[in-house]
Image: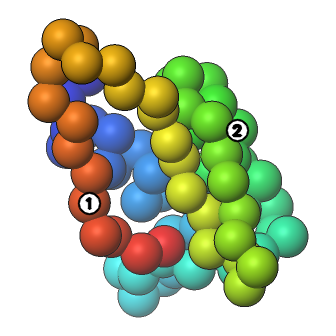
Amino acid sequence: MTFMDDFHALSALGATPAGGVERQAATEAHRQVREWLRDHGLSTVVDRIGNLFGLREWHPGEGSPCGNGLSG
């Protein structure tokens, strides 16, 4: 799996007819993304306003951590 494979898989969850993505808190699409993140080894955290984060614990020597600022 590449980054773009993951990007396209997540973009399909909550996709809109106009080509965007809408995943409001507590919706089915939001649940699907949480499940996808967990299935890929990430823990999930939701902040006070409903932003969803997938987190992976990083230990020195495991390679470089990376992330993105894509909202969904």
- Which amino acid type is shown beneath numbered disc 2? Glu
Disc ID at residue 4 = none
Q: Residues within 10 Å of mark 2 (few under 14, many from 20)?
A: some
Name which residue lies at 33% across and 39% down.
6
Indicate the secondary structure of the residue bearing disc 2.
helix
- Res 36 visible: no
Reading the image, the residue beneath label 1 is: 68
Label 2 to label 1: alpha-carbon separation: 19 Å
* Placement of the N terminus among the 4 image quadrants: top left
Closer mark to the observer between disc 2 and disc 1? 1
Q: Is residue 56 left or right of residue 2?
A: right
Disc ID at residue 35 = 2
Q: Quadrant of residue 24?
A: bottom right
Q: Is residue 10 left or right of residue 33?
A: left
First in sequence: mark 2 vs mark 1: 2
Q: Nearer the viewer, residue 32 or 68?
A: 68
Indicate the secondary structure of the residue bearing disc 1.
loop
- Which amino acid type is shown beneath numbered disc 1? Asn
